[in-house]
Amino acid sequence: MVKQDFSISDFAHLISPAAAEDLESLCQRSRALTLQRFGRVIRLFAPLYLSNECINNCKYCGFSRDNPILRVTLSVDEVLREARALTEQGFRNLLLVSGEHPKFASSGYMADCVRRLHEEVPSLSLEVGPMETEEYRGLVQAGADGLVVYQETYDREIYAEMHTAGPKRNFGWRLETPERAYAAGFRRIGIGALYGLGDWRVEAISVAAHADFLLRNCWKAQLTISLPRLRPCAGEFQPITHMSDRDLVQLVCAFRLMFPDVGLVLSTREPAKLRDGLNPLGITLISAGSHTEPGGYTGAGKQNLHHTERGRIVELGASEWAAAGPEVHATGQFDIADSRTSREIADLIRRLGYEPVWKDWDAALTA
Ligand code: SF4
């Protein structure tokens, strides 16, 4: 990775209200730098939810343990079925996502999923509860190459307020997760803040400082920064702070200028029109056609839907099944805003003059 020429205080200026007055020139610089470093390509990935069980309470998340949602953990065969539905669409880069629940979604279960999927999917990243280095090592050996962990908010007070129960309350343990992942051998590391909790500029400066630290200390890994904004979810949490579309554009450009070689990730949390505009400006990796519930692509696991109370499965009663109807599925983590299919997104990328890349990595390359 090439070290950038900007300092953290330069970055603070790039995201300031003063710099927003000349957003057009910021966009032009960012677009040119992205073209120079990444060429005319946009990588595609899809999230694959393994489980929506969770032992944490995060006020902003639909999977919080106290939410009376429909839950399920897919079997390894069901995960494979979901993965095949995605590879049939063209995806070769999957992000396996799970709530944090050692009983239902242990590191051993995840390693089994990764091992099985790795036979058919070249690039597998994980977005799961933080683990010890040794547990990560097992996942790397099974075939995972990327680890994504958002700090959510870098403000300790807001962090304590948002995370009311469960191991996620430990701010420092989460903050050090990327370093443990790196020590275990992950070659892609993703970080980010969840915008809508703290002041977006303060959060962004913290993300930049964290990224700067990781570029110096975990320099063999490829770093990505995600820019998720809060979306509606079960529990009806409302964002505490506002980040406008224009703010998001400014932040994408600022991250690009600060970190010319870092991948910038945009998910289907954002509406179609905004995503289309942001792609050429600095985004290098996008999700498409996403579902945020386990079994979302094939209906896998729906016969095992249940509630979970105090870590115990509570079967649905006959009246609940009847009320749920034939289209019942597990509850998603959040509502997506861009519901276009992966094909529609790929076609759009081509129309913009870019190439959609479904795969850019194969473990065989390191053999
Ligand atoms: S954000 Fe993660 S840890 Fe928190 S409730 Fe949701 S799935 Fe669980």
Image (tube, rainbow, N blue to C red):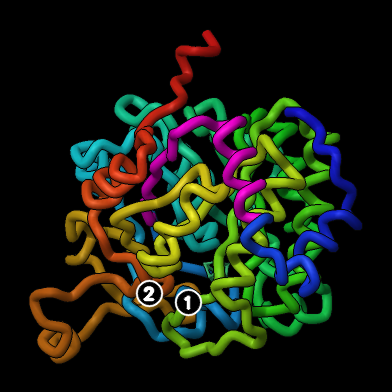
Disc 1 to disc 2: CB gap under 8 Å: yes
Q: Is residue 29 magenta?
A: yes
Q: Is residue 83 magenta?
A: no
Alpha carbons under labels 1 and 2: distance apart:
6 Å
Secondary element at tag 1: loop
Looking at the image, residue 105 lies above or below residue 367: below
Residue at 55 percent across and 35 percent down: it is 35
Q: Which residue is situated farthest in the top direction here?
A: 367
Residue at 68 percent across and 31 percent down: it is 221
Q: Residues within 10 Å of mark 2 (few under 14, many from 20)?
A: some
Residue identified by numbered label 2 = 335
Secondary element at tag 2: loop
Looking at the image, residue 14 lies above or below residue 236: above
Residue at 54 percent across and 50 percent down: it is 281
Looking at the image, residue 327 lies above or below residue 261: below
Looking at the image, residue 76 lies above or below residue 310: above
The image shows residue 184 at horizontal and vertical percentages of: 68, 32
Residue at 54 percent across and 75 percent down: it is 230
Residue identified by numbered label 1 = 231
Numbered range of the magenta stretch = 26-49
Q: Residues within 10 Å of mark 1 (few under 14, many from 20)?
A: many
The image shows residue 274 at horizontal and vertical percentages of: 44, 65
Q: Quadrant of residue 160?
A: bottom right
Q: Is residue 18 left or right of residue 230?
A: right
